[in-house]
Amino acid sequence: MPVLAIERYAFAADKVGTAEVFKLPMRASPRFVNDAFVDRVRNAGLRAVSFKPRWISDGSAAN
């Protein structure tokens, strides 16, 4: 049965590894980025880019 909705995100650090940008294998998955990517975007002074936290580095959900 396909996943219809994700209520809470939890990621396995060993599966994500050092990827700064990744998506789930589902066709319509959003892109996820880590703190290093967010810092790079902010340090570059890019505007009109926003990020919505989905999880905290300690593994807790940020929803």
Image: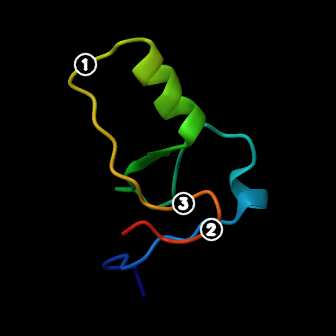
Q: CA distance from mark 1 to mark 3?
A: 23 Å
Residue contact at pointers 3 and 2, CB within 8 angstroms:
yes
Residue at (55% x, 40% y) in the render: 35
Q: 10 Å neighbourhood of mark 1: few (<14), some, or many (≥20)? A: few
Asked if labels 3 and 1 touch by Cβ distance under 8 angstroms, the answer is no
Q: Position of residue 39 (x, y in %)?
A: 51, 28
Give the CA separation, mark 3 to mark 2: 6 Å
Q: Which residue is mark 1?
A: 47
Is residue 4 rendered to the left or right of residue 42?
left
Give the image's coloring scheme: rainbow
Q: Which residue is mark 3?
A: 56
| Label 3 Cα crowd, 10 Å radius (few <14 / some 14-19 / many 20+) | some
Q: Amino acid at mark 1?
A: Arg
Residue 1, label in figure? none
The residue depicted at 75 percent of the width and 48 percent of the height is 17
In the image, what residue type sits under mark 3?
Ile
Q: Residue furthest left?
A: 48
Q: Earlier in the sequence, mark 1 or mark 3?
A: 1
